[in-house]
Amino acid sequence: MFNIIVDEEINLTLADPKYATKMFQLIDDDRDYLSQWMSWPKLTTKVSDCEASAKRMLHDYADGKCLPCYIIYKGSLVGTASFNVIDRSLKRVEIGYWLSATYQGRGIVTRVCQQLITVARNDLDIQKIQISVAEENAPSRAVCERLEFDLEGMIKHAENINGRIVTHAIYGKILE
């Protein structure tokens, strides 16, 4: 079974349809919060949506395009963290993550991203990590800053989140 141990409290497991019911409940509980920063929570209306999403991610994982992980904190599913894109020709990955509002403020995402950076460097021979966040998403931007990523720039009109056009802050880190 695929498992990345982050520390004594956190591990990452590969996205799996068997978590669909738990994932749907997590999304449903935080739908309004998550919908501030992402468009997909409003479109995730039933357990089968989570099953289908996990299956798509596993196909992309098998093709080497991504590394989709679920965050397990003290035995409970609390969010996701992934290499949303693995670009081997540029030796670059793009990290994406979300965490239940209930579990924020515990350093979970920061610790998870630190481990993903190690995986990128040691297992995938990656040279650059990139994270794109909505300009107004202060908690996600704080993660990037704690990880000592450089703010590389802003992309205006980067995404439509439920009718609201947002600017993305693009953060990057060159691995040495």
Image (tube, grey):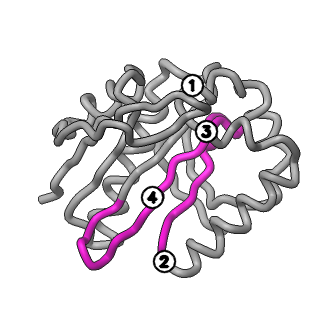
Q: Is residue 54 left or right of residue 159?
A: right
Element at label 3: loop
Of badges 3 and 2, nearer the viewer stands 3
Q: Dot 2, how many residues are within 10 Å of its Cα: few (below 14), some (14-19), or many (20+)?
A: few
Q: Magenta segment, which residues?
A: 64-93
Of badges 1 and 2, nearer the viewer stands 1
Of marks 4 and 1, which one's residue comes earlier in the chain?
1
| Residue under the image location 19 percent in, 36 percent down | 151
| Residue under the image location 81 percent in, 58 percent down | 51
According to the image, label 4 marks what residue?
83
**Horizontal and vertical percent position of residue 88:** 32, 76
Q: Quadrant of the N terminus?
A: bottom right
Above or below, 66 relative to 95: below
- Tell me the kind of residue under disc 1: Gln
Q: Dot 1, how many residues are within 10 Å of its Cα: few (below 14), some (14-19), or many (20+)?
A: some
- Tell me the kind of residue under disc 4: Phe
Of marks 3 and 4, which one's residue comes earlier in the chain?
3
Q: Which mark is residue 64?
A: 2
- Tell me the kind of residue under disc 3: Ser
Alpha carbons under labels 1 and 2: distance apart = 30 Å
According to the image, label 1 marks what residue?
36
The answer to whether the residue labelled 2 contacts the one labelled 4, judged by CB atoms less than 8 Å apart, is no
Alpha carbons under labels 3 and 2: distance apart = 25 Å
Element at label 4: strand
**Horizontal and vertical percent position of residue 99:** 57, 32
